[in-house]
Image: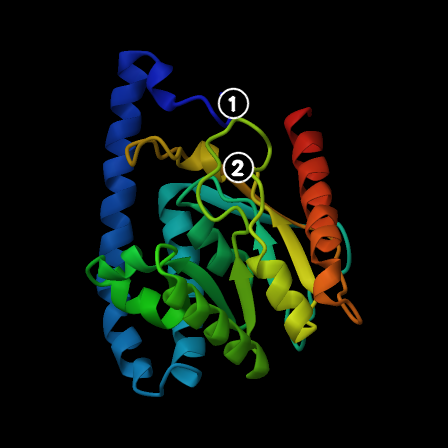
């Protein structure tokens, strides 16, 4: 099945089995949140930084357990040296599934804050955790976007990496990548923080963007490309930097899709 092919083209029996599995995956997701929520409340009293870092580690435990329960095994592939845990990065990745989010905490085990949609903060239980583990942005509001950029720069100064999907929303085009927004690259230049591109080639097969009832067990890879330094770059270099990262990620995705 290609990334842009919805899973509703399978035969009725397989579709029914997948729906049952999806319900199990959703229920186990919720039950694990309930089990871990008291610990999240406990560490949240330490504030957005220390408490947020502790919650991020709890999310790593949650993802390890949930992936095991639903039969998903993740694999980290390093095409360059592994990210240094004592360095900050701006991680950028392709975005094509809600499974991209648990893959962040599953494969990046250093303090990190993701830039995410403000609407997810309204989800019961998950929303509380999300407010500590992510920096929310409302793209419809220029003021909200500006505030989120300031928050991202603030956490970088505190020794915490950030994670941004430069496509902004799910890529439903059928192409390897959608056009990138400038935000991640502008922040990288202004904060002089290296970019680290990541590819999630399998998340769309574990949960297709077309339906919440399209869960499927199996492999889920995170492919870390070479870091892209930005020392000495100025805002004038932003278009070239964005094109360089786009080309790196697109080339790797095409290579994977052709294998």
| Residue 175 percent location from the top left of the image | 57, 29
Q: Is residue 110 left or right of residue 81?
A: left
* Residue furthest bottom as drawn: 46
Query: At x 74% / y 48%, what residue is drawn?
Result: 244
Query: At x 41% / y 58%, what residue is drawn?
Result: 116
Query: At x 27% / y 15%, what residue is drawn?
Result: 13
Q: How many marks?
A: 2
Q: Secondary structure at mark 1?
A: loop
| Residue 163 percent location from the top left of the image | 53, 61
- Give the Cα distance between marks 2 and 1: 11 Å
Q: Is residue 192 left or right of residue 160?
A: right
* Above or below, comparing residue 247 to residue 157 in the picture: above
Residue 227: tell me if it is visible.
Answer: no
* Above or below, comparing residue 209 to residue 148 in the picture: above
* Quadrant placement of the C terminus: top right
Judging depth in this view, the residue of 125 and 254 nearest the camera is: 254
Local packing at callout 2 (Cα closer than 10 Å; few below 14, some 14-19, many 20+) is many
Residue 139: tell me if it is visible.
Answer: yes
Judging depth in this view, the residue of 32 and 127 nearest the camera is: 127
* Above or below, comparing residue 259 to residue 233 in the picture: above
Q: Earlier in the sequence, mark 2 or mark 1?
A: 1
Q: Residue 2's mark?
A: 1
The residue to which callout 2 is attached is 202
| Residue 24 percent location from the top left of the image | 25, 40
Give the foreground label among 2 and 1: 1
Query: At x 67% / y 61%, what residue is drawn?
Result: 195
> Which image quarter: residue 230?
bottom right
Q: Are the two marked residues, 2 and 1, in contact with CB atoms closer than 8 angstroms? A: no
């Amino acid at each position: 099945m290609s990334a842009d092919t919805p899973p509703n083209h399978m035969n009725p029996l397989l579709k029914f089995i997948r729906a049952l599995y999806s319900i199990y995956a959703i229920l186990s997701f919720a039950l694990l949140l309930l089990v871990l929520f008291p610990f999240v409340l406990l560490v949240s009293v330490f504030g957005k930084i220390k408490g947020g870092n502790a919650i991020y580690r709890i999310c790593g435990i949650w993802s390890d357990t949930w992936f095991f329960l639903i039969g998903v095994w993740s694999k980290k592939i390093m095409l360059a040296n592994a990210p240094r845990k004592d360095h900050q990065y701006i991680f950028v990745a392709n975005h094509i599934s809600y499974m991209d989010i648990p893959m962040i905490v599953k494969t990046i085990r250093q303090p990190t804050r993701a830039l995410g949609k403000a609407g997810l903060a309204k989800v019961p239980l998950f929303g509380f955790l999300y407010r500590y583990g992510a920096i929310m942005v409302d793209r419809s509001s220029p003021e909200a976007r500006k505030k989120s950029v300031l928050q991202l720069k603030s956490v970088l100064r505190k020794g915490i990496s950030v994670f941004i999907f430069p496509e902004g929303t799910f890529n439903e085009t059928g192409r390897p990548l959608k056009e990138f927004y400038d935000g991640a690259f502008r922040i990288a230049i202004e904060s002089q923080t290296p970019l680290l591109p990541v590819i999630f080639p399998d998340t769309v097969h574990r949960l297709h963007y077309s339906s919440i009832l399209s869960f499927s067990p199996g492999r889920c890879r995170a492919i870390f490309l070479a870091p892209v330094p930005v020392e000495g770059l100025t805002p004038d270099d932003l278009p070239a930097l964005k094109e360089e990262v786009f080309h790196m990620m697109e080339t790797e995705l095409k290579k994977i899709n052709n294998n």
